[in-house]
Each structure stands twice: as structure tokens, then as C-alpha cells.
């Protein structure tokens, strides 16, 4: 009798079971990235701009907690985004120019990848809007930014629901642009030197102190 009553209550309110499962997946994501110290991956970035126009770029990514990262874009043109944890450099080799920002004030949103770099908490920084299961048994979780972020309206994560490993990040920007970042060949807890996250500009490179936005 107790089992039948429990079953009827579950059928009457199926979202309660789904919400609990979503909470568990979010816990897995947070726990997964709390246990790693470094991350290395290849990535493909798709930028959807206006009228269906898509720009594709690719490169490599390194992350070292807390707050250090290095994005190297190899195509269609070279771009290096380097954070020492204190400053972020956008280095354009072909233009011989580098822009420097205070850490956490640019690169889309400080919430977007904060949980991966050790400077955020997905459970407090983001609010679940919806979710869906994908054909490959991964989940797609759609979030609203919980802290009135001015740059990103929504963040979606494609994750392994059992491990919490993130395979894709999709950013719906306030500007109307959508960025999709796909990670491949992910490796964790490799030894990464701090020098990888330092930027020493060549003598012929102009360094501009940019204003935070």
C-alpha cells in the first residue's frame, strides 16, 4: 500500500523526480571540477553572428587553478588569450598588438567557465532553466545567469550526467551572438608550468591597457 501511494505521488508530480535528478547532475559537475587542478584540451568554436552567419575557429586550451588559463586559436587567424590569474592578455600576433584587462572582467563572462577555472560555483552562479537528454546519453542543461550578468543571457552545458564532465559550452550573448565551444581530447591533472600562463610581449608588439567592460 505504501509503495502504491508513493508511485501515485510520483506520477502526479513527475517534475519532482526530474528536478532531483538534475540537481544530482549539477552536483556531479561541481564535484568533478573541484577535484581537478589542471585541464588541457583541443577545442572547436562556432560563432553564430547575424542572419545565420557562422564563423569557425579552433585551437588548444590549458587551465590551471586558480584562475589561470591559456587559449590558443590557430585558425582562421592566430589569437592568444592568456590569464595569469591577475591579468588577461589578448595577443594578436599578425597585428603585433596585445590588449590587457584585469582578470574576470572580459572574455564573455566571468560566470561562463568560472566553475572550470576554480573561480566559480555552478550551483550558486547559475540557475537551471531547462534540460534535455541527447541521443548519445549526454545531457544538455540550460542555465540563466543568477548574478545579473550583463554579457551572457544563457549558458548551456552538454555533459556526461554520470561523471559531470563538460563536453560543450554554449553561450547566448546579450549582443545576440551565440558561441558554441566543443572540447576534444580532454586531459586532466597534468603538470603545467606557471610560465605557460605568463605573457612576455615581443619588442615590436604594442601593449594597450584596455578598459574593463
Image (cartoon, rainbow, N blue to C red):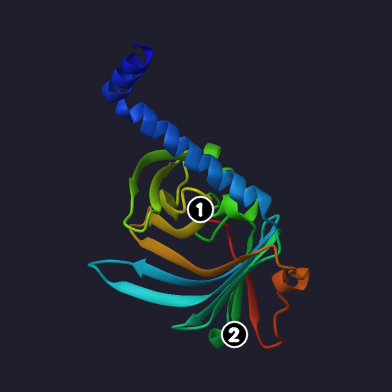
Q: Give above or below for 178 relative to 123.
A: below
Sort mark 1 into few (<14), some (14-19) or many (20+) by Cα contacts within 10 Å: many
In this orientation, which residue lies closer to the viewer: 27 or 6?
A: 6
Q: Residue furthest top?
A: 1
The image position of residue 212, as x and y in percent, is 57, 57
> Which of marks 2 and 1 precedes in the sequence?
2
Circle 2 sits on which residue?
96
Say which residue appears at 43% left-offset and 38% top-offset: 22
Quadrant housing residue 192: bottom right
Outermost residue to the left? 51
Residue at 59 percent across and 80 percent down: it is 97
Give the spatial CA distance, label 1 vs label 2: 28 Å
Residue ID at (36%, 57%): 175
Q: Which residue is mark 1?
A: 112
Q: Is residue 32 left or right of residue 162?
A: right
Disc 1 versus disc 2: nearer the observer: 1
Q: Position of residue 27 (x, y in %)?
A: 54, 40
Amino acid at each position: 500500500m505504501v509503495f502504491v501511494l508513493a508511485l501515485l505521488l510520483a506520477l502526479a508530480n513527475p517534475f519532482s523526480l526530474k528536478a532531483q535528478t538534475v540537481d544530482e547532475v549539477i552536483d556531479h559537475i561541481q564535484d568533478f571540477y573541484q577535484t581537478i587542478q589542471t585541464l588541457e584540451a583541443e577545442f572547436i568554436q562556432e560563432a553564430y553572428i547575424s542572419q545565420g552567419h557562422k564563423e569557425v575557429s579552433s585551437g588548444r586550451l590549458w587551465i590551471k587553478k586558480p584562475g589561470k588559463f591559456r587559449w590558443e586559436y590557430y585558425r582562421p587567424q592566430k589569437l592568444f588569450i592568456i590569464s595569469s590569474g591577475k591579468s588577461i592578455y589578448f595577443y594578436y600576433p599578425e597585428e603585433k598588438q596585445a590588449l590587457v584587462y584585469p582578470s574576470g572582467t572580459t572574455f564573455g563572462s566571468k560566470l561562463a567557465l568560472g566553475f572550470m577555472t576554480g573561480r566559480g560555483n555552478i550551483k550558486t552562479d547559475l540557475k537551471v532553466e531547462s534540460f534535455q537528454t541527447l541521443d548519445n546519453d549526454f545531457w544538455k542543461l540550460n542555465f540563466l545567469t543568477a548574478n545579473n550578468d550583463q554579457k551572457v543571457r544563457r549558458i548551456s552545458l552538454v555533459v556526461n550526467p554520470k561523471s559531470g564532465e563538460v563536453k560543450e559550452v554554449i553561450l547566448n550573448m546579450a549582443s545576440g551572438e551565440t558561441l558554441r565551444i566543443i572540447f576534444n581530447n580532454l586531459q586532466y591533472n597534468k603538470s603545467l608550468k606557471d610560465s605557460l600562463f605568463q605573457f612576455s610581449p615581443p619588442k615590436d608588439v604594442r601593449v594597450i591597457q584596455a578598459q574593463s567592460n
